[in-house]
């Protein structure tokens, strides 16, 4: 499969016509039709239902359009950033972050770094800790901000702060009015686990804390995003565990209850390449440490 196949497929799907898509792509219709047929043969599935009256996407085609549009949009952003860097000779500094850190000091860190040096363009990528390590080693990012400690000989880690964890429960739940909840009581509740993948991640950290306390929560639902997990809690599916800073969401349909266990904390960790001696990285780490301490 080549990138042009995706572009051709997206054009046909969006236009709903081989003729209009060919005009949009500035090519003849027969070669476009052949390219789409070849693409379908390589995938082993039909992407379009072809009739004399209409051209419709199959279920597989609808899925591919949705997912590939996200990929090509991101690719377009990368290409545009590459052009800007090449034209201005600016340096690139990539930051990967787990979403839950955005409720703490990380937004202020990003804001200050973006204005720290006119010759440095700061790029952002939402990713969990494991993909951060791979992105660091591949040079796609220069600083990762995550929540779990993973050992890698090429990566240096620095704990910036340790944040208490809290139980998020539906507003009408019996626990909602309590100041604190014990781990044994919390473990008896149906549990919403996040993120579901890739593993290991924050979910494994939370499960490990429960196991260390002699409990195994009953996971009834998994979610990939923190806000999805909070929404499922609000819907009454169960409870979950979140960093204390998530209270800044100020959702009126969810209550946050302190967990009566000193071990239920979550570190915020900076990760970077061991051989990176960049002055801007040093500046970013110093700023992150200062902001994390408040």
Image (tube, helix red, strand yellow):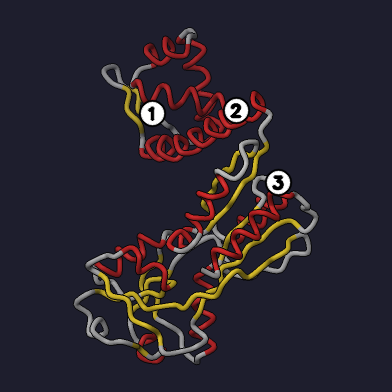
Figure disc tally: 3
Give the class, few, some or many, for how many residues have Cα within 10 Å of label 1's Cα (few <14, many ≥20). many
Circle 2 sits on which residue? 84
Q: Tell me the residue at 28%/75% (across/down).
A: 255
**Where on the picture, by quarter, is residue 247?**
bottom left
Check if mark 2's residue and mark 1's residue have beta carbons within 8 Å: no
Give the foreground label among 1 and 3. Answer: 3
Residue 128 lies, with reference to residue 191, above or below; the image says: above
In the rendered image, residue 74, in percent from the top left (x then y), is placed at 51, 37
Circle nearer the N terminus (2, 3)? 2
In the rendered image, residue 178, in percent from the top left (x then y), is placed at 27, 87
Residue 294 lies, with reference to residue 178, above or below; the image says: above
Circle 3 sits on which residue? 139
Secondary element at tag 3: loop
Circle nearer the N terminus (2, 1)? 1
Between marks 2 and 3, how big is the CA–CA gap? Answer: 18 Å
In the rendered image, residue 105, in percent from the top left (x then y), is placed at 49, 61
Circle 1 sits on which residue? 48
Check if mark 1's residue and mark 3's residue have beta carbons within 8 Å: no
270 left or right, relative to 9: right
| Foreground of the two, 228 or 23 | 228
Secondary element at tag 2: helix
Q: Tell me the residue at 62%/41% (across/down).
A: 117
Q: Tell me the residue at 36%/73% (across/down).
A: 220
Secondary element at tag 1: strand
Residue 186 lies, with reference to residue 120, above or below; the image says: below
Give the foreground label among 2 and 1. Answer: 2
């Amino acid at each position: 499969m080549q990138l042009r196949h995706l572009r051709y497929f997206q054009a046909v799907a969006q236009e709903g016509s081989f003729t209009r898509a060919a005009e949009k792509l500035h090519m003849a219709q027969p070669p476009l039709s052949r390219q789409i047929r070849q693409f379908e043969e390589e995938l082993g599935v039909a992407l379009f239902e072809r009739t004399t009256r209409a051209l419709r996407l199959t279920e597989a085609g609808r899925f591919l359009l949705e997912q590939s549009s996200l990929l090509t949009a991101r690719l377009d952003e990368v290409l545009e950033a590459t052009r800007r860097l090449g034209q201005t000779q600016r340096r690139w500094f990539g930051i990967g972050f787990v979403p839950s850190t955005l409720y703490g000091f990380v937004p202020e860190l990003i804001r200050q770094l973006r204005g720290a040096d006119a010759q440095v363009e700061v790029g952002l990528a939402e990713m969990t800790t494991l993909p951060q390590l791979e992105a660091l080693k591949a040079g796609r990012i220069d600083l990762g901000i995550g929540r779990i400690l993973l050992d890698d000989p090429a990566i240096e880690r620095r704990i910036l702060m340790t944040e208490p964890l809290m139980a998020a429960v539906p507003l009408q739940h019996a626990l909602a009015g309590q100041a604190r909840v014990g781990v044994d009581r919390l473990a008896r509740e149906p549990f919403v686990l996040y993120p579901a993948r890739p593993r290991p991640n924050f979910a494994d950290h939370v499960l490990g804390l429960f196991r260390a306390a002699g409990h195994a929560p009953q996971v009834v639902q998994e979610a990939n995003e923190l806000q999805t997990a909070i929404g499922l809690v609000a819907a009454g599916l169960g409870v979950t565990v979140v960093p204390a800073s998530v209270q800044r969401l100020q959702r009126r349909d969810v209550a946050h209850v302190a967990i009566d266990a000193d071990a239920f904390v979550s570190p915020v960790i900076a990760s970077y390449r061991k051989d990176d001696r960049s002055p801007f990285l040093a500046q970013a780490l110093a700023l992150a440490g200062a902001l994390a301490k408040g």
